[in-house]
Image: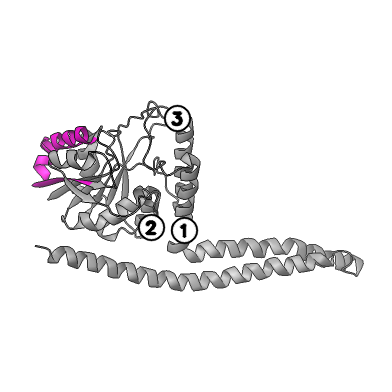
């Protein structure tokens, strides 16, 4: 089997050499040596202007340059995915280049995939809510709990951390991954794999939060609030695309139900008084709300048909990726 550990990197010259050395040491560990005959370290270079690329190459890592405007880690992963597949990994692990995560946790991440028990394994920093990682700000901690709670609500799951970028993927998961967000991808991947019926597991990992460390996710401005808004938009877009009938159908039901209140009040008033006056305007409100509901129900039916077309397109993308991988020498 072949293991590829990859990391997005933007101006990480201060830490990238250290992280690569740590990963290399893990490759020599008993578990990795026993289960993987090939190992590679890949750096997805996101327009670094410092010595990140040179240092990574000096340490023996493969460097893939992600061309174009820097818009976020989601874009780096999306474009880097096709490059990773050319290496034909059986298991791929994503880790940050800033030394936040401990590469010694890699065997724990890959074990469920090696054993055939998971398609994606994600690290969790918050399994023990009473002892969160040292140094994490209250804002980030609260944000993680809120976003995780929302994903659990949408998927009816009980994950403890959906925002961790330290993850392991099987080859099948890599072939089926389709993400569209630029700023981030971590929550979108959860929804993508869940709706494709893939198995997701969590394992506890160690993480260090640096007070003066600037996240590459937040470097585009707006800070954590803007990141949260972008994450929510990505999640609701994924819900719209993967489960459009329920998404638009729920909105339709809401508006139709809402139209009943003014409508029933107006009918009741007419029944007791014999006139719609002076509440006739409620009839127009009820008709408007009911019309919006029926319009959304029509959209739900059309979106459901488009979703079936999307599923077929993703199957074609999967087959093309698989064929391209198998044809490479």
Whether 34 is among the magenta residues is yes
Q: Kindly give the residue lying farthest to the front in the view shown.
A: 49
Report the disc number at residue 137: 3
Disc 3 vs disc 1: Cβ atoms closer than 8 Å?
no
313 or 272, nearer to the observer:
313
Q: Which secondary structure lies at badge 2?
A: loop
- How far from the left and from the top, in percent, is residue 11? 29, 39
Label 1, label 2: how many angstroms apart (C-alpha)?
10 Å
Mark 1 or 2, nearer chain start: 2
Whether 265 is among the magenta residues is no
Q: Which secondary structure lies at badge 3?
A: loop
The crowd level at tag 3 (other Cα within 10 Å; few <14, some 14-19, many 20+) is: few
Give the mark toward the camera: 1 or 2. 2
What are the residue bounds of the magenta stretch? 16-43
Disc 1 vs disc 2: Cβ atoms closer than 8 Å?
yes
Q: Is residue 204 left or right of residue 52?
A: right
Report the disc number at residue 237: 1
Report the disc number at residue 180: 2
- How far from the left and from the top, in percent, is residue 208? 33, 29
Using the image, determine if residue 272 lies above or below residue 135. below
Colouring mode (rainbow / by chain / secondary structure / one colour): one colour
Residue at 20 percent across and 57 percent down: it is: 85
* Total marks in image: 3
Could you tell me what secondary structure mostly forms the magenta stretch? Answer: helix
């Amino acid at each position: 089997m072949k293991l590829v550990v990859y990391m997005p990197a933007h101006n990480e010259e201060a830490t990238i050499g250290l992280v690569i050395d740590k990963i290399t040491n893990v490759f020599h560990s008993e578990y990795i040596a026993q289960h993987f005959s090939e190992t590679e370290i890949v750096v997805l270079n996101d327009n670094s202007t410092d010595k990140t690329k040179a240092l990574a190459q000096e340490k023996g890592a493969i460097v893939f340059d992600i061309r174009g405007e820097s818009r976020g880690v989601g874009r780096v992963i999306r474009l880097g995915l096709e490059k990773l597949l050319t290496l034909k990994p059986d298991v791929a692990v994503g880790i940050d280049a800033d030394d936040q995560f401990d590469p010694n946790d890699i065997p724990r991440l890959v074990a469920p995939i090696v054993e055939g028990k998971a398609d994606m394994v994600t690290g969790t920093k918050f399994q023990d809510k009473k002892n969160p990682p040292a140094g994490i700000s209250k804002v980030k901690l609260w944000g993680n709990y809120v976003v995780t709670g929302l994903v659990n609500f949408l998927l009816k799951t009980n994950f403890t951390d959906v925002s961790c970028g330290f993850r392991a993927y099987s080859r099948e998961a890599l072939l089926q991954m389709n993400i569209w967000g630029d700023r981030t991808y971590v929550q979108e991947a959860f929804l993508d794999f869940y709706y494709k019926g893939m198995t997701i597991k969590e394992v506890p990992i160690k993480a260090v939060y640096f007070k003066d460390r600037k996240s590459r996710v937040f470097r585009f401005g707006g800070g954590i609030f803007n990141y949260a808004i972008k994450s929510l938009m990505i999640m609701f877009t994924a819900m719209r695309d993967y489960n459009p009938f329920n998404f638009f159908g729920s909105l339709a039901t809401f508006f139709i139900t809402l139209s009943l209140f003014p409508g029933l009040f107006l009918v009741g008033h007419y029944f007791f008084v014999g006139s719609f006056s002076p509440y006739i305007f409620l009839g127009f409100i009820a008709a408007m709300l009911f019309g919006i509901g029926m319009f959304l129900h029509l959209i739900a039916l059309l979106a459901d048909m488009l979703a079936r077309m999307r599923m077929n397109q993703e199957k074609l993308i999967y087959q093309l990726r698989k064929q391209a991988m198998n044809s490479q020498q």
